[in-house]
Amino acid sequence: MVDVSVVIRYLSWFLLAASMFVAGLYLRPRELGAALKQYSLLGRAVLANSVVVPLIGLGLYFITPMSADIGVAFLLVTFSFGVPLAVNFIKTIRADVPFATVLVFALAAVTSITMPILLYFFLPVSFSVVKSFLAIILFVTLFQLLPLILGLALGDSQTVRRKILRPLAIITAACGIFLIGLVIIIGLALIAFVGIWPILAMITLTLVSLGVGWVFGGPKLINREVLAINTALRNFPICFLLATTIFIDTKTEVGIAIFASIMLLSVFGFSRLISHYQPPKKETPSLSESTKQRQV
């Protein structure tokens, strides 16, 4: 488990940075500016991820029998949000990628503040709030903010876009498929070590989070899809970071891997369902894809 967990950890961190860099290359500043103006939608997304889902997760945590290590993993995942991998799924359903990119970073910024506070009050074991806060801030800056800024800065260069964008997008997609498959396989293989009740709690929280995001997305289908995926897919790479720097020598990584496999399977199934059954969208004039077509 140790060797595999190391692969999952570093591969997920690479994918975070690569996904944000590719998103920056695809997007133009005016698209991000338009996404930032959707104040109401951003506010509802922050509310759903930082208040509603954690409250539901806490309820499930208190009523579900689970070991201390698995309980720590459950709370870590519950309190974390804003993972760039959500943008990869959103691209597959041709939803609002500019808004999804802004939302991912906004949620990651919020989770860097709320996560240490929530963990301080509800975690069953003692830990350093300052250390966790600094670790999350550094993580978000290095793996999400800086790659996005670098991608935006280089995106105006047609030479850079032509030489880097397609190969990196292919590499990122291949690594993403490998990571998702690996996490799912490992997670499913470790289910026996956790027990049925924690698994049911993880499944319940994931499915309920999909529903919460869908409802908070408002009347527009495209917004519901973006919020559903971003709300259900919690920031498990940050959880791996905390598990390996603060909660050392515990089975917390096992619980995170299982939870991540459940989330990835659920979001993958949801995105495939949306792609198969939903009609073509007519309300996405700001999509990066349309920008690419205009530039060709």
Image: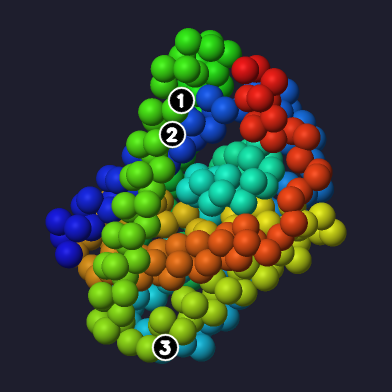
Q: Give the residue type that dot 1 points to.
A: Leu
Q: Considering only vertical position in the picture, is 6 above or below 33?
A: below
Q: Give the residue type that dot 3 points to.
A: Trp
Tell me if 241 is positioned left or right of 209 in this view.
left
Rendered location of residue 71, percent (x, y): 39, 75
Classify the position of the C terminus by image quarter.
top right
What residue would you read off at disc 2?
A: 169
At x 23%, y 68%, the residue is 250
Q: Considering only vertical position in the picture, is 295 above or below 1?
A: above
Q: What SS does tag 1 mark?
A: helix
Q: How many marks?
A: 3
Q: Nearer the viewer, mark 3 or mark 2?
A: 2
* Proximity of marks 3 and 2: CB atoms separated by less than 8 Å: no
Q: What SS does tag 3 mark?
A: helix
Q: What SS does tag 2 mark?
A: helix
Instruction: For residue 111, say whether it is visible.
Output: no
What residue would you read off at disc 1?
A: 165
Q: For the residues marked 3 and 1, what is the alpha-carbon distance in whole angstroms? A: 44 Å
* Proximity of marks 2 and 1: CB atoms separated by less than 8 Å: yes
At x 41%, y 43%, the residue is 173
At x 60%, y 39%, the residue is 101
Rendered location of residue 111, percent (x, y): 54, 51
The label shown at residue 286 is none
What residue would you read off at disc 3?
A: 197
Q: Earlier in the sequence, mark 3 or mark 2?
A: 2
Q: Nearer the viewer, mark 3 or mark 1?
A: 1
Classify the position of the N terminus by image quarter.
bottom left
Q: Give the residue type that dot 2 points to.
A: Ala
